Image (cartoon, rainbow, N blue to C red):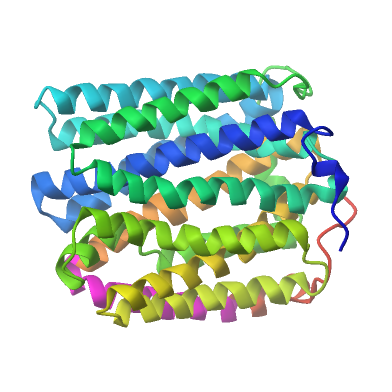
């Protein structure tokens, strides 16, 4: 396939700024996640509290997702992003200051994470809705893959560096994460061609819930969004990585950083491949196959007692997940008109954050009940079962061959 000139720097400088901002904030957030997880586990020594880390970030995303989507369709999306990232920056600075003063406690960490969750609830639909306006629709899937490659490249270095910096102290990790969010804010502020909000009429119940009604009328959208919820909710292992690093693999913070980086490494290589070679045939079956691969890699990780095999399993898990993410994200954006993208992405945020943050809570609870290894094994089997059920429930999605369709 020939290189696409539409994605070159000189052709789309706003896309490059958006790409850099996304990578920087992703880098910072991954470093933050490593430090917070290890710090909470070091303070309490309880697996249950790792689940709470996910829960306090999930609650705001659930409560605010629909209003945030409505705001993204009615106001300047860039300004929403800038305000949200500024709040996250201040929250990270607060974590660093409390840690440096030796007054940090579990409750304080969870309270600050709750504030970060509120900011990110508004950031997600605004960010997702901006990208289709920065590149032509014909290259949107590859633009998404490129954006993901930048995020994943930062995520590879972020967790590993976070684990190494944690040896100095968690406040060092928070300081670097705050600097990266500042970089993201500066890059986002440089966007010159900012998409306009469609209208600014007063919100009504009908307009706020319009995203839900739109998804219900489009089975392919419902299928891809709900597949992410149930598959990743069951198959997620991220929250349990501190447990596996210390108690199963008998390693420390540096190795935890490597474990956190391994899925990103697999995702990076896959996203680079997808950025140059778009998926153009049998996209439905390709997506289902990738989610099944995610489940199988989860099973291998759960059975492993070797650091090398665990890293390989997490690498494969990330690669399979990236195929699914690019297909699902492209379907959501291409099947949704611009005036509805904020609200549809708001609904999508509920499903994605449920699978991620609530998935961490579910993993922590299940691990506390049956143990970390059985919890991961149950999740892997559950993911495979979800793939089979969803293939039966959404036959048009299973048979779908191309990404683009006519919007109605």
Q: Residue at x 46, y 68 (%)?
A: 315
Q: Is residue 387 magenta?
A: yes
Q: Nearer the viewer, residue 180 or 376?
A: 180
Can you tell which quarter of the image residue 304 is in? bottom left
Magenta-highlighted stretch: main secondary structure? helix
Front residue (pair 290, 11): 11
* Left or right of 269 in this view: 93: left
Tell me where residue 103 appears, x and y as whole percent.
Answer: 9, 25
Q: Is residue 221 left or right of residue 242?
A: right
Residue at the spot 18% in from the left edge and 55% down from the top edge? 48
Q: Residue at x 42, y 69 (%)?
A: 314
Q: Is 282 part of what is drawn in magenta?
A: no
Q: Which residues are magenta?
A: 368-389
**Residue 205 appears in the figure:** no
Query: Visible in this render: residue 132?
Result: yes
User: Is residue 214 placed above or below 340 in the rendered structure?
Assistant: below
In this image, 48 relative to 21: left or right? left
Percent coordinates x, y for residue 323 in the rendering: 63, 65
Estimate the x, y position of residue 375 in percent, counting from the top left. 28, 73
Name the residue nearer the viewer: 385 or 302. Answer: 302
- Based on the displayed image, in which of its 4 quarters is residue 201 positioned? top right
Looking at the rendered image, the quarter that the N terminus falls into is: bottom right
What is the tally of numbered marks visible in this picture? 0
How far from the left and from the top, in percent, is residue 16? 70, 34
Residue drawn at the location 64% of the way across and 45% of the way down: 147
| Apparent side of residue 27 relative to residue 250 in the rendered image (left or right) | right
Closer-to-camera residue (2/72):
2
Eyeballing the image, is 189 above or below 229? above
């Amino acid at each position: 396939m020939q290189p696409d000139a539409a994605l070159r720097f000189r052709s789309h400088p706003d896309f490059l700024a958006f790409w850099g901002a996304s990578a920087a904030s992703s880098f910072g957030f991954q470093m933050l996640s490593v430090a917070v997880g290890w710090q909470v586990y070091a303070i309490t020594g309880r697996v249950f509290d790792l689940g709470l880390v996910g829960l306090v970030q999930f609650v705001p995303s659930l409560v605010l997702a629909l209003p945030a989507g409505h705001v993204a369709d009615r106001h300047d999306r860039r300004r929403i992003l800038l305000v949200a990232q500024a709040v996250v920056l201040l929250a990270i600075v607060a974590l660093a200051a409390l840690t440096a003063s030796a007054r940090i406690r579990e409750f304080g960490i969870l309270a600050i994470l709750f504030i970060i969750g509120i900011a990110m609830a508004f950031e997600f639909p605004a960010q997702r809705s901006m990208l289709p306006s920065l590149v032509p629709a014909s290259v949107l899937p590859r633009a998404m893959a490129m954006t993901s490659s930048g995020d994943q490249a930062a995520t590879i270095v972020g967790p590993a560096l976070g684990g190494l910096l944690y040896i100095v102290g968690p406040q060092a990790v928070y300081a670097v994460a705050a600097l990266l969010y500042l970089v993201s804010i500066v890059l986002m502020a440089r966007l010159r061609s900012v998409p306009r909000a469609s209208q600014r009429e007063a919100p009504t119940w009908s307009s706020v819930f319009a995203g839900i009604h739109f998804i219900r009328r489009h089975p392919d959208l419902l299928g891809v969004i709900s597949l992410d919820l149930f598959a990743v909710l069951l198959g997620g292992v991220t929250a349990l990585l501190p447990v596996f690093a210390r108690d199963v693999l008998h390693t420390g913070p540096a190795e935890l950083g490597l474990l956190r980086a391994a899925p990103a490494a697999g995702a990076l290589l896959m996203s680079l491949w997808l950025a140059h070679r778009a998926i153009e045939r049998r996209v439905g079956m390709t997506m289902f196959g990738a989610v099944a691969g995610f489940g199988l890699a989860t099973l291998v990780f759960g059975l492993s007692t070797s650091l090398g095999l665990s890293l390989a399993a997490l690498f494969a898990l990330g690669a399979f997940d990236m195929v699914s993410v690019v297909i699902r994200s492209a379907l959501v954006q291409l099947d949704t008109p611009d005036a509805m993208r904020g609200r549809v992405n708001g609904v999508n945020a509920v499903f994605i954050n449920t699978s991620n943050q609530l998935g961490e809570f579910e993993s922590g609870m299940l691990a506390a009940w049956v143990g970390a290894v059985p919890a991961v094994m149950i999740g892997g089997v559950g993911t495979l079962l979800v793939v089979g059920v969803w293939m039966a429930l959404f036959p048009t999605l299973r048979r779908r061959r191309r990404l683009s369709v006519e919007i109605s």
